[in-house]
Amino acid sequence: MGNFSKKNPMHSNWGSACSDSDWGFGNDSRFGNDSRFDSHSKFDSHSKCKKSCKVCKSDDVSACKCNFKAPARELAAPLNSDCVLVNSVVGSKTVQKVAEAVFPFTAFDPDIPVGSIINNVAVVTGSITRNTSIIRDKVVNIGLVAVTITVTFTPPGSTTPDTATLTTSLLFQEHTDFPGACPEDAVIESPFVIEGIFTQAGTPFVGADGTVTTAAILVKVILRTTITVTRQVIVDSHGGICDINDRRCESPTTPPTSNF
């Protein structure tokens, strides 16, 4: 700002913010007879100064219209490219998976006697663990569903029901077709939703000695999830797309092996 004189704080080396007439010292030298503002203008010497500053004796404080702008934010490091890295969706689909197993009567605690009448089978599910991998055109899942199985039964020759329990896990493994998917793509699975739990007593079971018995119970859990396969690509300012790895879908010389 300029240096203000002691006589008039609104006068500086560059002039005054208001004219002499604004301060009551005579005609406004800025708006003479040849001015584009005529004598009827609201800026004439007979009216109070209606300018957007309080120092000009303005009665209308709202005349001050300020347009504040925040300072531009500077990036920590300037970008050296107008390209961006995005995830392209290769495919997305909702699928069902089946976790099931057959358990002999001897697997429960206490053992269910052979010939017992199965009154009810209740299954309570727990945590679900899964491992996912991609091979060419397929998504492979392997996982476990924790379950607690409670069986209400009536032993042979008795009329009093009894209960037996078993805490274990059910295995599921599925492969889902995804045309165009490649091993280096990424896969996202939504949380599993349990759609149904099914049990059936009297299911055949092959024992360790090779004998077949129907003193067993089948437990089946239906799971639903949505699988989405994505791929990182580069997009330029004109909308052109290129893969960050243009050889990701080349067939490997040896089949891939995944240790979950």
Image (cartoon, helix red, strand yellow):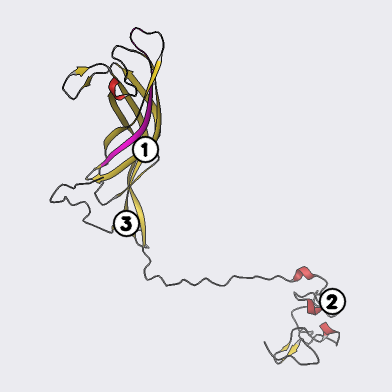
- Report the amino acid beneath label 3: Val
- Report the amino acid beneath label 1: Ile
The C terminus - image quarter = top left
Give the magenta part as a residue range.
139-158
| Number of marks drawn | 3
Q: CA distance from mark 1 to mark 3?
A: 32 Å
Q: Magenta stretch: residue 155 in it?
A: yes
Q: Count residues near mark 1 (Cα–Cα under 10 Å), then give few for <14, some for 14-19, many for 20+.
A: some
Q: Magenta stretch: residue 116 in it?
A: no
Q: Secondary structure at mark 3?
A: strand
Is residue 104 in view from this perspective? no
Q: Secondary structure at mark 2?
A: loop
Write the residue at 30% across / 28% down.
100
Residue for badge 3 = 233
The dot on residue 128 is 1
Q: Quadrant of residue 207?
A: top left
- Residue 251's place in the image compared with 93, above or below, is below
Residue for badge 2 = 48
First in sequence: mark 3 vs mark 2: 2
Q: CA distance from mark 1 to mark 2?
A: 80 Å
Write the residue at 54% across / 72% down.
72
